[in-house]
Amino acid sequence: MGRLILVLILGLGLANGALAATGSDGGVRIKDLGRLSSAKDNALVGYGLITGLAGTGDSSRSVATMQSIKNILARFSVSLPVGDIRSRNVASVMVTATLPPYAQIGDKLDINVTSLGDSRSLVGGTLLLTHLTGADRRVYALAQGQLSVGGFSYDLNGNIVQKNHPTSAYVSDGAIVERGLETSLMSASGHVQYILYNPDFSTASMIADSLSALLGAGSARAIDAARVQVRVPDSQRSELVRFLTRIENTQVNPDIPSRVVVNERTGTVVSGGNVRISSITVTHGDLNVAISTEFTVSQPLLVRGTGDNVRTQVVPQTSIEVSEEVPLNLSLPNNSTIADLVSALNKVKATSRDIITILQGIKRAGALHAELIIQ
């Protein structure tokens, strides 16, 4: 692991993995903290066939593929027994897509295609018309198109050269929405509800207070840590889109939980700006022991009369070296930050593994006032 460590001080949006969009006053828009309860994605799935493969499709052992070929040919008045089909240019696949909220007829979706049988590669294939259904088994989109495969696999005489996964593919705009979603923005009682991406009681209360100040006392209330309910005035129900625009652009200062995320593989430490450390003293050192063995050959000179007792001998020579690094000593005052700690450790040339170990020790000592997440 390298000696370089990256420390990011994120004041906002650490729990969601990205900085939220902020306004001029430092607040975060409600649209970046949550979503309408009715605005949810929907998973679609379908079963289809890939044609045009160069002998890398499913074998005759994939009975489902052979039966699918027979069924699709029957639609074009071609009747063949399953046992007579020997094509390796066809593969059965599963097709998945995500139907976004407010999708309308004619919208295009990206699709993912994955092999279902024993196909070796989908390179060069074309997906035939495939129905994509939702959880209610209704068809919401139709998929078809040329595959884009980000890998390859070639083999000859037992030698295989492969890159990435050639049995999965992607088609940009490969599906067309055939059935739109009926989404109700407002409930029958005249309320809209926002769901927070990162549930937090303090943030939910702040959102409710900000909306009540904007729309009038009692207009919004926090139901729990994840839901905020807003009452739509009678005068705004005919202009619901404008009303929601005012809500989602209202800015609040969310309360971000204190967390420190450590990636041991890359030596990356990501910390929130409000993470504090109590007064601590750290002493850290290493003891290195190196043992090496070299084998030499002893070749004695031939001496008359020695007989069979003269022979070549392998002689091991072992050396042991012990080195102890000077331990690093570090003291931090009360209310220091993670940035102060890492900066001090970098000055004494501590490795990223050392920093991770020290953070774990500080957490166990109770001096790190944050949740420590090791990836």
Image: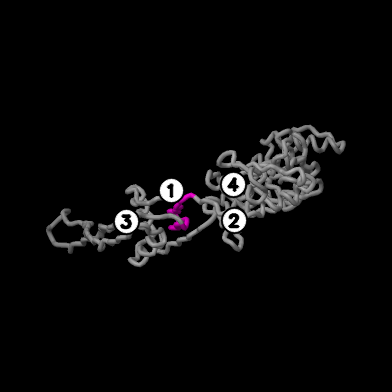
Contact, CB < 8 Å: mark 2 with mark 3?
Answer: no
Given the image, on which type of amino acid does mark 2 rest?
A: Val
What SS does tag 2 mark? strand
Q: Amino acid at mark 4?
A: Tyr
Instruction: Give the magenta-colored segment's residue range.
Output: 257-273
Instruction: Please tell me whether residue 318 is drawn above or below residue 135 in the rendered image.
Output: below
Label 2 Cα neighbours within 10 Å, binned few <14 / some 14-19 / many ≥20: many
Query: Does 195 sit above or below residue 22?
Result: above
> Residue at 59% of width from left, 46% of height from top?
197
Q: Quadrant of residue 99?
A: top right
The answer to which image quadrant residue 340 occupies is bottom left
Of residue 254 and residue 328, the one placed in the foreground of this image is: 254
Q: Nearer the viewer, mark 3 or mark 4?
A: 3
Q: Quadrant of the N terminus?
A: bottom left
Q: Which mark is residue 28?
A: 2
Q: CA distance from mark 1 to mark 4?
A: 19 Å
Residue sitting at the far right: 77
Residue type at mark 1: give it: Glu
Instruction: Name the residue at the front extreme.
Output: 217
Q: Which residue is mark 3?
A: 279
In the rendered image, residue 149, in percent from the top left (x then y), is placed at 67, 53
